[in-house]
Amino acid sequence: MKYPPLSRALTALLASLSLQLSIPAAEKHLSREDAISMALRQNPDLGVAALEIQAARARLHWAGQLPNPELQITASDDFPGEASGERSLEIGFTQRFPAVSALRSTRELRRQQLAIAKFEFASRARQTAFKADQTWIELAIASRSVGLHKDLLELGLGVATFLEKRETLGEASRIDVAQARLKNRLLTQQIADAQSRTRAAASRLRQLAGLPIDTLPTTEPATNPPPDSPIRSLDLQEILARRDDYQALLLGLPASVTRLALARARSREEISLSVFYEADRSIDEPEGAGTNHFAGLGISIPLPLRRNNGEEIATAEIGMARARGRQEALAYAIEGEVNAALETRLAAHRLALESSGELLSDARELLEETTRAHQSGLVSLLQVQQAQEQLLEIETGALRLLEAYLMADARVRLVTASYPVDLAPSQSSSPRPSQP
């Protein structure tokens, strides 16, 4: 069995890796906060969602206006009868007037709905920021995984080179060389898999950030967690003041009260006021034909014999009770979410810190010592491969724990509403509080 020289093997490995990723026309390096802020500014779905605020603002602008007046024209002639030339013409204008409270309640309801629309947009933007944060973490972890496997591949190629030289001197077996090369091929496949995950995460991040299709977002590899433990508790009232969904629900109760007042006002029918002019040409004996003119004012007041709009009133009353119950339930749920997220982040931080500390350092040192001992003939190739696999397992575990910590940190930012979300996209406002 013959094997190609190391240079040919290395060339094949590098060619295989270079084919795994086609670089678009331009790269865009994004930090974690850059990815979040860009998604909040440029995400196409958020641009569409912002139209709901404009629609609510338009409804407020046109709310509380009187209905258009009615023009009434009535003409009559006696040509079907005696055809004596008698005729009449009546012109009238009628304006209907809803109850004053109905107009006022309509405008107030539209104002409250505009505020709710802004909070609903902020809630959607917060979810978009969370998705961008998660995707950035996935991309950073995948990038670090690529670098980790490439470092191990470089070590593996060094072992293979050493064995090839020893084989030419008859001091190493072909089986050892074959095992070293198979190990390197396995690492090459793992690099290709990590690159595939990198491309997928980069594509999702590009869509979330609203970048051009020919742009490749890149990140620095994820770094180890900070040495200091994250905080374990936060003020619930401050969180509720930032939570857009809770604030929207708070506005839901006064909106329900206004909706009930509007429904009751609409139960009273509109008053109509009419102004009319009438010209009447008739035959009056013995004077003959003559024209008389009339002008008048009429008012129509409905009698409250029956209660109208009962269904809308009952629905509004139920909506008030529902708003009170949902407000209490959401506050309780938010408190549970925050406590769970903080505890999860604290546990994930401790595990990630431990996995990236002394254990990982010992595994790397062991691999280096084993490699030098193998080159001196003190240990076998199997022991070198075992040290490589052990380091890879520890590195991969540490990477998973780091990803778990970063995802838990993103979850804390979501439930505490700590992303820099503005209430209205068209208006500049101060950003939300920084990350807890």
Image (cartoon, rainbow, N blue to C red):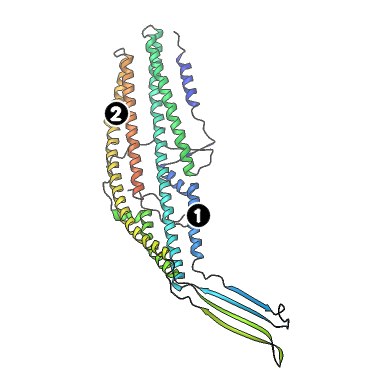
**Going by the image, does 336 lie left or right of 99?**
left
Kindly identify the residue that appears in the image at 47 percent across and 25 percent down.
Answer: 17
Residue pointed to by mark 1: 51
Circle 1: element type: helix
Residue pointed to by mark 2: 361
**Going by the image, does 49 lie left or right of 176?**
right
| Above or below: residue 76 compared with residue 431 | below
| Above or below: residue 268 compared with residue 118 | below
Eye-nearest disc, 2 or 1: 1
Kindly identify the residue that appears in the image at 47 percent across and 70 percent down.
Answer: 103
User: Which mark is drawn over residue 274?
Assistant: none
Q: Quadrant of the N terminus?
A: top left
Q: Decide which of 106, 8 is in the foreground and name it.
A: 106
Q: Decide which of 237, 384 is in the foreground and name it.
A: 237
Name the amino acid, label 2. Answer: Ser
Q: Are marks 2 and 1 in contact (CB under 8 Å)?
A: no
* C-alpha distance separating marks 2 and 1: 54 Å
Mark 2 neighbour density, 10 Å: few (under 14) some (14–19) many (20 or more): some
Q: Which residue is outermost to the top?
A: 170
